[in-house]
Amino acid sequence: MESIKVVEHMDRHPVLLEANMSLATAVDKLLQNKKLGAPVIDSSGALVGFLSQQDCLAVMLKSSYHCDLVATVSDCMKTEVLTVTVDESVLQLAEQMLQNKPKIYPVLDGQKVVGTIDRTAVLQAINVSMQECYLAPV
């Protein structure tokens, strides 16, 4: 089971945001794709931050009182981001998810964001593996 790798279960087509993108555009992308958050990348595809729906809420709520949403992604994103690599074990990630609370992790290959993996994908990977254990001949 240790051989289950992140690359086998990651979302290979994640929503990617740019720091200079308007917050309104970023929120639209998150909502259209039903994502709780997304990596923020630079022009070379390197990770520079992460924007979650929760990060957007406070800014949008405050802006709603004055109808003046002028924020950009860089105004709201977190710059300290927990990540995983394509070769990491899903089990190690599951253990990390028990300690740290991010629901979505950007997946890196070198410095470039190549996907994301969330709790649902991790749980699904472990569940499939456990089902194989139960069905394996003795």
Image: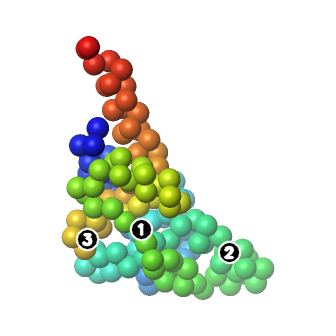
Mark 2: give few (<14), some (14-19) or many (20+) Cα within 10 Å.
Answer: few
Front-lying residue, 62 or 6: 6
Question: Taking 21 as reference, is 86 left or right?
Answer: left
Residue furthest out toward the right = 65
Which label sits on residue 82? 1
Q: Residue at x 36, y 39 (%)?
A: 125
Kindly identify which numbered label has been placed on residue 112.
3
Q: Amino acid at mark 2?
A: Ala
Work out whether mark 1 precedes mark 3 in sequence or the reverse, and give the earlier one: 1
Name the residue that disc number 2 marks.
Answer: 58
Residue 100, image x, y percentages: 50, 61
Label ID, residue 73: none
Which of the 4 image quadrants contains residue 47?
A: bottom left
Q: Which amino acid type is shown beneath numbered disc 1?
A: Leu
Q: Earlier in the sequence, mark 2 or mark 3?
A: 2
Give the residue displayed 28% in from the left and 65% down from the top.
108
**Mark nearer the viewer, 1 or 3:** 1
Mark toward the start of the polypeptide (1 vs 2): 2
Image spot of residue 95 (x, y percent): 43, 51
Residue 70 picture quarter: bottom right
Whether residue 40 can be seen here: yes
Q: Position of residue 2 (x, y in %)?
A: 27, 43
Residue furthest top as drawn? 138
State the CA–CA distance, disc 1 to disc 2.
22 Å
